Amino acid sequence: MTNNNKNSNGPKTDEGKAISSRNSITHGLTAKSWINDTEQELFDATLEELNQDFNPQSHIEKMLISKLAECTVRLARMQRVEDAMFDLASSESAHPDLSIISLSNNNEDLSHAVKDTSPIKLQFNANEFTKKMDLLDEIKSQNFDDISNWSYIESNMQRTAKHVIQECLDNNIRLHNFITKKTSQSNVMKIILVAAKEKDAVKENTNNPILTSSEITESSKNIKSSNLHKYLDSLSQTLIKDLQVQTVLKDLDKRIQQIKNSAIPDAQKLSLVQRYRTADERQFSKTLGELLELQKRRKASS
Protein backbone atom coordinates (compact mmCIF):
# COMPACT_ATOMS: atom_id res chain seq x y z
CA MET A 1 0.00 0.00 0.00
CA THR A 2 1.35 3.44 -0.97
CA ASN A 3 1.52 6.03 1.76
CA ASN A 4 0.58 9.31 0.09
CA ASN A 5 1.79 11.29 3.10
CA LYS A 6 5.19 9.62 3.33
CA ASN A 7 7.17 12.33 1.59
CA SER A 8 4.66 15.14 2.01
CA ASN A 9 6.02 18.31 3.58
CA GLY A 10 2.94 20.43 3.06
CA PRO A 11 1.77 22.48 0.07
CA LYS A 12 4.41 23.26 -2.57
CA THR A 13 2.72 25.83 -4.80
CA ASP A 14 1.98 29.44 -3.87
CA GLU A 15 -1.74 28.72 -4.27
CA GLY A 16 -1.51 25.70 -1.99
CA LYS A 17 0.41 27.65 0.62
CA ALA A 18 -2.17 30.44 0.50
CA ILE A 19 -5.03 27.97 1.02
CA SER A 20 -3.18 26.36 3.91
CA SER A 21 -2.56 29.76 5.46
CA ARG A 22 -6.25 30.67 5.17
CA ASN A 23 -7.24 27.41 6.83
CA SER A 24 -4.84 28.12 9.68
CA ILE A 25 -6.13 31.65 10.10
CA THR A 26 -9.71 30.36 9.98
CA HIS A 27 -8.83 28.13 12.89
CA GLY A 28 -7.46 31.25 14.57
CA LEU A 29 -5.80 29.61 17.51
CA THR A 30 -2.92 28.13 15.55
CA ALA A 31 -2.52 30.75 12.84
CA LYS A 32 1.11 30.86 11.65
CA SER A 33 0.85 34.49 10.61
CA TRP A 34 -0.68 37.35 12.52
CA ILE A 35 -4.41 37.49 11.93
CA ASN A 36 -4.76 41.27 12.23
CA ASP A 37 -2.75 44.48 12.53
CA THR A 38 -3.15 44.50 16.31
CA GLU A 39 -1.25 41.23 16.62
CA GLN A 40 1.49 42.49 14.30
CA GLU A 41 1.83 45.68 16.37
CA LEU A 42 1.95 43.66 19.60
CA PHE A 43 4.64 41.40 18.15
CA ASP A 44 6.76 44.36 16.99
CA ALA A 45 6.43 46.16 20.33
CA THR A 46 7.17 43.01 22.36
CA LEU A 47 10.16 42.15 20.19
CA GLU A 48 11.60 45.63 20.67
CA GLU A 49 11.15 45.49 24.45
CA LEU A 50 12.70 42.01 24.69
CA ASN A 51 15.69 43.13 22.62
CA GLN A 52 16.18 46.03 25.00
CA ASP A 53 15.86 43.76 28.05
CA PHE A 54 18.16 40.96 26.86
CA ASN A 55 20.46 42.72 24.36
CA PRO A 56 20.98 39.57 22.20
CA GLN A 57 24.49 39.15 20.75
CA SER A 58 24.11 36.04 18.60
CA HIS A 59 21.73 34.87 15.91
CA ILE A 60 20.42 32.10 18.21
CA GLU A 61 19.69 34.58 20.99
CA LYS A 62 17.75 36.74 18.52
CA MET A 63 15.79 33.68 17.34
CA LEU A 64 14.87 32.79 20.93
CA ILE A 65 13.74 36.36 21.63
CA SER A 66 11.64 36.30 18.47
CA LYS A 67 10.05 33.04 19.66
CA LEU A 68 9.28 34.66 23.03
CA ALA A 69 7.54 37.53 21.22
CA GLU A 70 5.54 35.03 19.16
CA CYS A 71 4.45 33.17 22.29
CA THR A 72 3.39 36.46 23.87
CA VAL A 73 1.15 37.30 20.90
CA ARG A 74 -0.39 33.82 20.85
CA LEU A 75 -1.09 33.97 24.60
CA ALA A 76 -2.81 37.33 24.11
CA ARG A 77 -4.83 35.72 21.32
CA MET A 78 -5.86 32.87 23.63
CA GLN A 79 -7.02 35.38 26.23
CA ARG A 80 -8.95 37.35 23.62
CA VAL A 81 -10.63 34.21 22.29
CA GLU A 82 -11.53 33.02 25.79
CA ASP A 83 -12.95 36.44 26.70
CA ALA A 84 -15.04 36.40 23.52
CA MET A 85 -16.31 32.90 24.31
CA PHE A 86 -17.49 34.00 27.75
CA ASP A 87 -19.08 37.14 26.28
CA LEU A 88 -20.90 35.01 23.70
CA ALA A 89 -22.07 32.51 26.31
CA SER A 90 -23.31 35.39 28.45
CA SER A 91 -25.20 36.95 25.53
CA GLU A 92 -26.78 33.66 24.51
CA SER A 93 -27.85 32.92 28.08
CA ALA A 94 -29.52 36.32 28.42
CA HIS A 95 -32.63 35.19 26.52
CA PRO A 96 -35.65 35.81 28.81
CA ASP A 97 -37.03 32.32 28.09
CA LEU A 98 -34.16 30.70 30.01
CA SER A 99 -34.75 32.94 33.01
CA ILE A 100 -38.50 32.41 32.84
CA ILE A 101 -38.06 28.63 32.90
CA SER A 102 -35.65 28.95 35.82
CA LEU A 103 -37.94 31.23 37.85
CA SER A 104 -40.96 29.05 37.03
CA ASN A 105 -39.24 26.04 38.62
CA ASN A 106 -39.71 24.17 35.32
CA ASN A 107 -43.50 24.60 35.56
CA GLU A 108 -44.39 24.49 31.86
CA ASP A 109 -47.85 25.98 32.29
CA LEU A 110 -46.46 28.93 34.22
CA SER A 111 -43.59 29.35 31.76
CA HIS A 112 -46.04 29.46 28.85
CA ALA A 113 -48.25 31.92 30.74
CA VAL A 114 -45.31 34.30 31.22
CA LYS A 115 -44.17 33.94 27.60
CA ASP A 116 -47.72 34.62 26.40
CA THR A 117 -47.77 37.90 28.31
CA SER A 118 -47.80 40.81 25.89
CA PRO A 119 -44.46 42.66 25.54
CA ILE A 120 -46.06 45.79 27.00
CA LYS A 121 -46.97 43.91 30.19
CA LEU A 122 -43.75 41.88 30.34
CA GLN A 123 -42.52 43.71 33.41
CA PHE A 124 -43.39 43.68 37.07
CA ASN A 125 -46.01 46.22 38.11
CA ALA A 126 -46.06 46.67 41.88
CA ASN A 127 -49.37 48.57 41.92
CA GLU A 128 -51.16 46.00 39.78
CA PHE A 129 -49.70 43.19 41.87
CA THR A 130 -51.02 44.75 45.08
CA LYS A 131 -54.47 45.41 43.58
CA LYS A 132 -54.80 41.84 42.34
CA MET A 133 -53.57 40.43 45.63
CA ASP A 134 -56.11 42.51 47.56
CA LEU A 135 -58.86 41.49 45.16
CA LEU A 136 -57.99 37.81 45.51
CA ASP A 137 -57.84 38.09 49.31
CA GLU A 138 -61.29 39.68 49.32
CA ILE A 139 -62.81 36.88 47.23
CA LYS A 140 -61.08 34.16 49.24
CA SER A 141 -62.32 35.67 52.51
CA GLN A 142 -65.95 35.19 51.52
CA ASN A 143 -68.24 32.23 52.12
CA PHE A 144 -69.82 31.70 48.71
CA ASP A 145 -73.02 30.45 50.36
CA ASP A 146 -73.56 34.01 51.59
CA ILE A 147 -73.29 35.46 48.10
CA SER A 148 -76.89 35.22 46.95
CA ASN A 149 -77.05 38.24 44.65
CA TRP A 150 -75.17 41.21 43.21
CA SER A 151 -76.29 43.44 46.08
CA TYR A 152 -74.26 41.34 48.49
CA ILE A 153 -71.14 41.90 46.39
CA GLU A 154 -71.80 45.64 46.22
CA SER A 155 -72.21 45.83 49.99
CA ASN A 156 -69.53 43.40 51.17
CA MET A 157 -67.02 43.08 48.31
CA GLN A 158 -66.29 46.62 47.14
CA ARG A 159 -63.04 45.76 45.38
CA THR A 160 -64.72 42.96 43.46
CA ALA A 161 -67.71 45.13 42.54
CA LYS A 162 -65.42 47.91 41.30
CA HIS A 163 -63.37 45.43 39.24
CA VAL A 164 -66.44 43.87 37.58
CA ILE A 165 -68.08 47.22 36.81
CA GLN A 166 -64.83 48.43 35.23
CA GLU A 167 -64.72 45.29 33.08
CA CYS A 168 -68.26 46.00 31.92
CA LEU A 169 -67.44 49.63 31.19
CA ASP A 170 -64.36 48.65 29.20
CA ASN A 171 -66.43 46.25 27.10
CA ASN A 172 -69.59 48.41 27.05
CA ILE A 173 -71.70 45.48 28.19
CA ARG A 174 -74.42 45.10 30.80
CA LEU A 175 -73.55 43.27 34.01
CA HIS A 176 -76.07 40.49 33.50
CA ASN A 177 -74.75 39.72 30.00
CA PHE A 178 -71.15 39.96 31.16
CA ILE A 179 -71.58 37.42 33.97
CA THR A 180 -73.62 35.12 31.73
CA LYS A 181 -70.95 35.09 29.05
CA LYS A 182 -68.17 34.53 31.55
CA THR A 183 -69.89 31.54 33.14
CA SER A 184 -71.54 29.80 30.20
CA GLN A 185 -68.46 28.05 28.89
CA SER A 186 -67.73 24.43 29.66
CA ASN A 187 -64.43 23.93 27.91
CA VAL A 188 -61.35 25.76 26.71
CA MET A 189 -62.33 25.74 23.03
CA LYS A 190 -65.64 27.40 23.77
CA ILE A 191 -63.86 30.01 25.87
CA ILE A 192 -61.54 30.79 22.98
CA LEU A 193 -64.45 31.05 20.55
CA VAL A 194 -66.46 33.26 22.87
CA ALA A 195 -63.44 35.46 23.52
CA ALA A 196 -63.18 36.00 19.77
CA LYS A 197 -66.89 36.79 19.57
CA GLU A 198 -66.58 39.20 22.48
CA LYS A 199 -63.84 41.07 20.64
CA ASP A 200 -66.14 41.39 17.66
CA ALA A 201 -68.94 42.46 19.96
CA VAL A 202 -66.76 45.18 21.44
CA LYS A 203 -66.05 46.45 17.94
CA GLU A 204 -69.77 46.48 17.19
CA ASN A 205 -70.50 48.20 20.50
CA THR A 206 -68.24 51.09 19.60
CA ASN A 207 -71.09 52.37 17.46
CA ASN A 208 -73.62 51.91 20.27
CA PRO A 209 -74.28 54.44 23.02
CA ILE A 210 -71.77 54.18 25.86
CA LEU A 211 -73.37 52.59 28.90
CA THR A 212 -73.17 54.30 32.27
CA SER A 213 -72.51 52.47 35.54
CA SER A 214 -76.17 52.64 36.51
CA GLU A 215 -77.26 51.30 33.13
CA ILE A 216 -74.77 48.46 33.44
CA THR A 217 -76.22 47.29 36.75
CA GLU A 218 -79.91 47.73 35.80
CA SER A 219 -80.47 44.00 35.29
CA SER A 220 -78.23 42.84 38.14
CA LYS A 221 -81.22 41.37 40.01
CA ASN A 222 -81.59 38.77 37.28
CA ILE A 223 -78.12 37.29 37.83
CA LYS A 224 -78.26 33.81 39.34
CA SER A 225 -76.25 33.22 42.48
CA SER A 226 -74.77 30.09 40.88
CA ASN A 227 -73.42 32.21 38.04
CA LEU A 228 -71.93 34.67 40.49
CA HIS A 229 -70.20 31.79 42.27
CA LYS A 230 -68.85 30.43 38.99
CA TYR A 231 -67.63 33.84 37.93
CA LEU A 232 -65.90 34.52 41.25
CA ASP A 233 -64.23 31.11 41.14
CA SER A 234 -63.05 31.75 37.57
CA LEU A 235 -61.84 35.23 38.52
CA SER A 236 -59.90 33.73 41.45
CA GLN A 237 -58.13 31.29 39.15
CA THR A 238 -57.27 34.09 36.72
CA LEU A 239 -55.91 36.25 39.53
CA ILE A 240 -53.79 33.39 40.88
CA LYS A 241 -52.31 32.84 37.42
CA ASP A 242 -51.67 36.57 36.94
CA LEU A 243 -49.99 36.82 40.34
CA GLN A 244 -47.78 33.83 39.57
CA VAL A 245 -46.75 35.50 36.32
CA GLN A 246 -46.06 38.77 38.10
CA THR A 247 -43.98 36.94 40.72
CA VAL A 248 -41.81 35.57 37.92
CA LEU A 249 -41.53 38.97 36.25
CA LYS A 250 -40.61 40.58 39.56
CA ASP A 251 -37.26 38.76 39.64
CA LEU A 252 -36.80 38.39 35.88
CA ASP A 253 -34.16 41.11 35.37
CA LYS A 254 -32.21 39.90 38.39
CA ARG A 255 -32.34 36.27 37.23
CA ILE A 256 -31.27 37.21 33.69
CA GLN A 257 -28.21 38.94 35.15
CA GLN A 258 -27.45 35.96 37.39
CA ILE A 259 -27.61 33.56 34.45
CA LYS A 260 -25.43 35.87 32.35
CA ASN A 261 -22.83 36.12 35.11
CA SER A 262 -22.71 32.34 35.54
CA ALA A 263 -22.67 31.50 31.83
CA ILE A 264 -19.89 29.14 30.76
CA PRO A 265 -18.80 28.50 27.15
CA ASP A 266 -19.02 25.10 25.52
CA ALA A 267 -16.75 22.83 27.57
CA GLN A 268 -15.09 21.20 24.55
CA LYS A 269 -14.25 24.52 22.89
CA LEU A 270 -13.05 26.04 26.15
CA SER A 271 -10.85 23.00 26.78
CA LEU A 272 -9.31 23.40 23.32
CA VAL A 273 -8.40 27.04 24.02
CA GLN A 274 -6.93 26.14 27.40
CA ARG A 275 -4.81 23.36 25.87
CA TYR A 276 -3.34 25.78 23.35
CA ARG A 277 -2.73 28.31 26.13
CA THR A 278 -0.94 25.71 28.25
CA ALA A 279 1.20 24.67 25.27
CA ASP A 280 2.21 28.30 24.60
CA GLU A 281 2.95 28.93 28.28
CA ARG A 282 5.24 25.89 28.34
CA GLN A 283 6.89 27.00 25.11
CA PHE A 284 7.46 30.48 26.53
CA SER A 285 8.95 29.10 29.75
CA LYS A 286 11.17 26.65 27.84
CA THR A 287 12.38 29.31 25.42
CA LEU A 288 13.08 31.80 28.21
CA GLY A 289 15.09 29.17 30.07
CA GLU A 290 17.14 28.41 26.96
CA LEU A 291 17.81 32.11 26.37
CA LEU A 292 18.92 32.72 29.95
CA GLU A 293 21.16 29.66 29.92
CA LEU A 294 22.71 30.68 26.59
CA GLN A 295 23.44 34.19 27.82
CA LYS A 296 24.83 32.84 31.07
CA ARG A 297 27.32 30.65 29.17
CA ARG A 298 28.25 33.53 26.87
CA LYS A 299 28.95 35.85 29.76
CA ALA A 300 30.90 33.14 31.61
CA SER A 301 33.17 32.54 28.61
CA SER A 302 33.89 36.20 27.97
Image: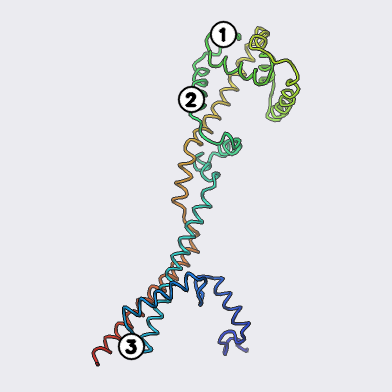
How far from the left and from the top, in percent, is residue 173?
69, 17
Alpha carbon separation for disc pair 3 and 2: 80 Å
The disc at residue 130 is: 2
- Residue at 42 percent of width and 70 percent of height: 75
Toward the bottom, the furthest residue is 301
Q: Quadrant of the C terminus?
A: bottom left
Image height of 100 relative to 215, above or below: below
Mark 3 — residue? 57
How far from the left and from the top, in percent, is residue 76?
43, 68
How far from the left and from the top, in percent, is residue 245?
54, 33
- Residue at 55 percent of width and 87 percent of height: 9
Dot 1 falls on a residue whose secondary structure is helix
Q: Are marks 1 and 3 in contact (CB under 8 Å)?
A: no
Of pointers 1 and 2, the one earlier in the residue sequence: 2
Nearer to me, 122 or 178: 122
- Residue at 60 percent of width and 10 percent of height: 150
Q: Nearer the viewer, mark 1 or mark 3?
A: 3
- Residue at 52 percent of width and 29 percent of height: 243
Mark 1 — residue? 152
Residue 109 lies in what quarter of the image?
A: top right
Q: Is residue 104 left or right of residue 70?
A: right
Nearer to me, 117 or 77: 77
The disc at residue 66 is: none
Instruction: Mark 1: give few (<14), some (14-19) or many (20+) Cα within 10 Å.
Output: few
